[in-house]
Image: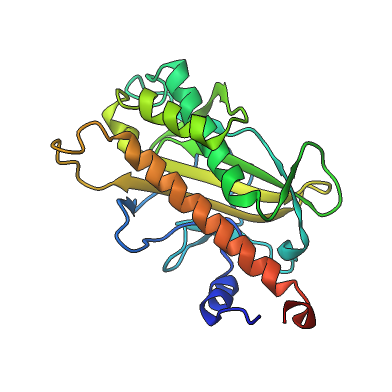
Amino acid sequence: MRIPRQWARAAATLLGVLALLGTVGCSTTYQIRQVHKSGFLCDYSQFRKGGKDEAQLVYHHPTADIGKYRRILFDPVVIMADHAKSSAFTTMSPEQQQAMVNYVDARVREKLQPDYAFVTAPGPEVMRLRVAITEVEGATIVLDTVSSVVPIGLAISALERLLVGAPASVGKAGVEGEILDSLSGERLAAVVDARAGRKITWRFDKFKRYRTFEDAFDEWTTRLQERLAVLRARNTPAEASR
């Protein structure tokens, strides 16, 4: 089976792994022009500015063979919020915050479980995945809420039920993430990006502010799945793929 040409080109751009973003079709979200670094990632000096169909800031290890990894150690998803009293995240209830992190955790697992085993300890050929939901501006503090492993159906229903009354600025969502070698801690790929929802009409969609958050992370996790598929294919011997 031949690798589609467009996949090969995508791999060559090497958002590498977490290169999740860009506008796709008639997306209900759009990429925000400028992102703010939250401090979730230890090192921002390695990043370059993303190009077309890439996150705003991207990094990939120039020689790492990400395709060889077959298992994932997934850290609990966290929220990076603003100190300001007007912060959308800090004014949410603990239940709303929990719904957000659980949704992201469940969506990542749903997308990647067909191809990867999720493990609870470092090991050979285990990548460590770290993800933070960030406030679009001024995110500098880590909230106490961390994700739990829940079925995707429960995560979706909780998100829809609890974020209906969330602050208006839940219409913006940021992400920071990185993939590390679980044993050495060497960074393999990383990304910083943010998206905002398109105009809400307040007619049929007046209760759908949570859709921006949901749609943004659906798009990011889909891109993650696609890039990892590219890299696995590149790591498969040609004769084994025929």
Q: Is residue 42 above or below residue 94?
A: below
Where residue 74 appears, x then y in whole percent?
68, 40
Q: Is residue 24 left or right of residue 38?
A: left
Q: Residue 147 falls in which quadrant of the image?
A: top right
Q: Is residue 28 above or below residue 22?
A: above
Q: Residue 210 falls in which quadrant of the image?
A: top left
Residue name at image x 68 percent, y 56 percent: 115
Where residue 50 appears, x then y in whole percent?
47, 63
Where residue 42 appears, x then y in whole percent?
64, 42
Most foreground residue, 181 or 222: 222
Residue name at image x 62 percent, y 51 percent: 112
Query: Dividing the image into 4 quarters, which one contains the C terminus?
Result: bottom right
Q: Please, which residue is most extreme toward the right here?
A: 124
Q: Is residue 76 left or right of residue 68?
A: left
Residue name at image x 48 percent, y 51 percent: 220
Q: Is residue 48 above or below residue 194?
A: below
Most foreground residue, 101 or 149: 149
- Can the viewer see residue 181? yes
Q: Residue 166 falls in which quadrant of the image?
A: top left
- Can the viewer see residue 47? no
Where residue 1 appears, x then y in whole percent?
66, 80
Question: How many numbered dots are placed on residues in this image?
Answer: 0
- The image's colour scheme reads rainbow
Q: Is residue 38 left or right of residue 75?
A: left
Residue name at image x 13 percent, y 37 percent: 203
